Image: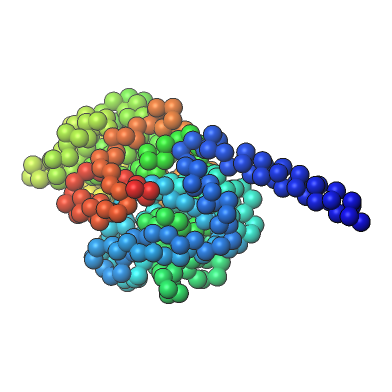
Amino acid sequence: MHIRQMCHAQRLISCVRTLRSSISRRFSTNSYPHSSSADFTTMSTAAGLTIPCKAAVAWEAGKPLVMERVEVAPPQAMEVRIKVKYTSLCHTDLYFWEAKGQTPLFPRIFGHEAAGIVESVGEGVTDLQAGDHVLPVFTGECGECAHCKSEESNMCDLLRIDTNRGVMLSDEKSRFSINGDPINHFLGTSTFSEYTVVHSGCLAKINPLAPMDKVCVLSCGISTGLGATLNVAKPKKGSSVAVFGLGTVGLAAAEGARIAGASRIIGIDLNPSRFEAAKKFGVTEFINPKDYDKPVQEVIAEMTNGGVDRSVECTGNINAMISAFECVHDGWGVAVLVGVPTKDAVFMTKPINVLNERTLKGTFFGNYKPRTDLPSIVDMYMSKKLELEKFITHTVPFSEINKAFELMIRGEGLRCIIDIDE
């Protein structure tokens, strides 16, 4: 009996050593060069447990975010908990933080453009595992609904954007809490936190060699503008493209036109201070509508012998939307609407503009399916076809996240990267 126990103990020790070796190889930082060994130590020991961490909490509309110690619960069925490495500030965060024109929901953890590493996965998640590099996205891809199965749509029935939801889908509860009191989620991502929980269908697994401080900006605005041009407008090489609005989304649309080989990219904006920087994104000509005493669509038609081949509207202003449609050439012109107007706005144009074979299209997230398509955009950056560095104008440590809000309010720069580990 004593000998059998000793043999059993020796076999157990051997198994433990083998298991430790396996875990060490699986979470080796050589496989994930942009992750620190500390991250993997946490990931290998905290699965199934609540993780205390820092988060920037918005307690009320328009007031500075407060750095708090929050508890992040383990992921439930079809959920994933990730360690956020880098996040950036988008105008959507600012809009809902200011609570303009919609029902306020506070306290809340904002943030939806980010990159991180999977810490643990919930029941039923089979396509992701601890250590994977991911981009969380405000919309998702369940893979089962009619939209996900369609090659023409990315508007998932289950995981479509819902700005009013502050809880997870599975049980309608928050994964964030402070002293037992729940904190609301935002867009299912809430990346202004060291750790967050996201539905697995809203995570795109990416190349682990991609620098997360660059590709984190692909989770929203840049992909939206880029896809609006490449996937929806589809300009041909040598064609002309008009871009309305030269903010981040508009410049991403211009970048798409540059990549597609457009010969003329005309930027339209009421702020001429944006013109010089837009040249880096391939914009060749500029129009400030305030400089003319006639509709800008007429100005563009005169410049282009009847109209541009493609236009992309990125402001959400209803008059700009009408101009974007009416400035495209009859017979083959295509206008794409990206900007989100007020809910009561009405689009009006003469029917003859449609009958003369102009096409009007809308797009959501650039028609990209998050899980399927975002990895290829990361690869486009890795192959130097897509340039992301020129979108990034500022970087701040997590402790100074409110500076990112101040910069955006003042209209300074494009994307501000927030380093969560600093």
Q: Name the image quarter holding residue 252.
A: top left
Which is nearer the eye, 178 or 24?
A: 24
Which is nearer the eye, 160 or 180?
A: 180
Left or right? Give the position of 124 relative to 273: right
Left or right? Give the position of 314 relative to 386: left
Residue drawn at the location 28% of the way across and 70% of the way down: 60
Residue drawn at the location 35% of the way across and 70% of the way down: 107
Position in image of residue 135 (x %, y %): 46, 46
Q: Name the image quarter holding residue 103.
A: bottom left
Asked if one can make out residue 174 in the rendered structure from this viewpoint, the answer is yes
Left or right? Give the position of 106 relative to 98: right
Position in image of residue 121 (x %, y %): 58, 55
Which is nearer the eye, 132 or 48?
A: 48
Q: Residue at the far front: name it.
A: 2
Position in image of residue 358 (x %, y %): 33, 42
All told, the count of numbered labels is 0
Asked if one can make out residue 100 in the rendered structure from this viewpoint, the answer is no
Q: Is residue 283 above or below residue 200?
A: above
**Which image quarter is the N terminus in?**
bottom right
Q: Is residue 123 above or below residue 417?
A: below
Position in image of residue 255 (x %, y %): 32, 34
